[in-house]
């Protein structure tokens, strides 16, 4: 984090700690100190405010990236002014531009979430429902060793295929799964709940915390888990379809 307001850095650090999603590995107050980092290896996300004393953040980031072997997943530049040079420089370096120096910390948090969603579907030409369901459950940390995993995979595929209402009565969902797998609704309910709790307690929890915001003693209900998963999958599908439209428009 590079920002010339120590209060902002402290509040951002506290906010991320409360969310248990990120921690601020290092912070600097000016462009000179940012440039002294040498490179950006070892960072997942870099957030920098431009106009840091004599050395601007954009200039520092440009130099650091040239010496970086493994670039961060996301680099966000907050700036009070934008011109064609700044915009083009950010595009060239893959930097996400925020033209608002008064942006709220909660908005930065939400921005990272949206970037993660887009990052998972970038450069994909079509939406493979089954593959995307499996990939999402894997990123969340659900383990295939639990029978509940199979139930989640089955239900999410049905929801995508038939556009089922994500707020559908859970008893109906348990019954549908039970009928398909020739078991009882009670067993399905218990297995799905156990799968969530057991899997997330054993994973690093990064993606799960980003989606559900759970902590060690508070895991999402089965209903919430399905709602968030289907919402995420639909957002991914929509993004891929928009990419297809953009490609077609450019060709025309």
Image: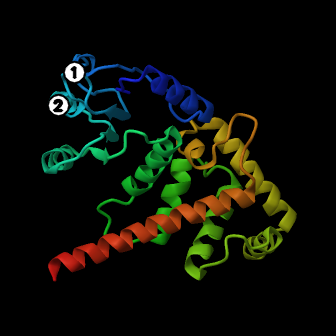
The image quarter containing residue 43 is: top left
| Position above or below: 9 against 110 | above
SS type, badge 2:
helix
**Which class describes the residues within 10 Å of circle 1: few (<14), some (14-19), or many (20+)?**
many
Which residue occupies 82% across, 55% down? 190
Disc 1/disc 2 C-alpha distance (Å) = 9 Å
Residue 177 appears left or right of 56:
right
Mark 2 residue crowding within 10 angstroms, few (<14) / some (14–19) / many (20+): some
Q: Quadrant of residue 100?
A: top left
Asked whether residue 239 is in view, the answer is yes
Under circle 1, the secondary element is helix
- Above or below, comparing residue 183 to residue 73 in the picture: below
Q: Quadrant location of the N terminus?
A: top left
Quick check: 30 above or below 73? above
Task: Name the mark on residue 35.
Answer: 1
Q: Residue at x 26, y 33 (%)?
A: 70
The structure residue drawn at horizontal position 68% and vertical position 36%, both measured from the top left corner, is 215
The colouring scheme, among rainbow, by chain, secondary structure or one colour, is rainbow
Quarter of the image for the C terminus: give it: bottom left
Q: Could you tell me residue 204's position as x and y percent?
A: 56, 35
The residue under the point 62% across, 59% down is 228
Whether residue 126 is visible, yes or no, is no
Instruction: Please state the horizontal and vertical placement of residue 179, each as a whole percent of the image.
Output: 78, 76
Residue matched to label 2: 59
Q: Are marks 1 and 2 in contact (CB under 8 Å)?
A: yes
Point out the tag, 1 or 2, that comes first from the N-terminus.
Answer: 1
| 42 sits to left or right of 87 | right
**Residue 113: x, y in percent?**
48, 49
């Amino acid at each position: 984090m590079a920002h010339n307001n120590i209060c902002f850095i402290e509040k951002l650090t506290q906010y991320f700690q409360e969310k248990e999603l990120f921690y601020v590995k290092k912070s600097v107050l000016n462009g000179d100190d940012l440039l002294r980092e040498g490179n950006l290896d070892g960072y997942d996300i870099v957030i920098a405010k431009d106009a840091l004393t004599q050395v601007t953040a954009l200039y520092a980031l440009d130099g650091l990236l040239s010496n970086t072997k493994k670039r961060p997943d996301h680099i966000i530049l907050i700036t009070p002014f934008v011109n064609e040079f700044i915009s083009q420089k950010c595009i060239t370096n893959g930097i996400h531009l925020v033209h608002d120096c008064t942006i709220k910390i909660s908005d930065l948090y939400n921005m990272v979430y949206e970037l993660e969603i887009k990052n998972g579907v970038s450069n994909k030409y079509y939406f493979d429902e089954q593959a995307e369901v499996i990939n999402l459950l894997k990123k969340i940390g659900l383990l295939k060793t639990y029978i509940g995993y199979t139930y989640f995979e089955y239900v999410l595929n049905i929801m995508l295929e038939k556009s089922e209402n994500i707020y559908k009565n859970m008893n109906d969902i348990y019954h549908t799964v039970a009928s398909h797998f020739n078991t009882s609704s009670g067993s399905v309910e218990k297995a799905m709940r156990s799968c969530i709790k057991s899997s997330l307690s054993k994973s690093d929890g990064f993606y799960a915390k980003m989606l559900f915001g759970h902590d060690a003693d508070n895991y999402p209900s089965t209903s919430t888990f399905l709602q968030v998963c289907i919402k995420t999958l639909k957002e991914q599908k929509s993004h891929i379809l928009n990419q297809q439209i953009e490609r077609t428009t450019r060709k025309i």
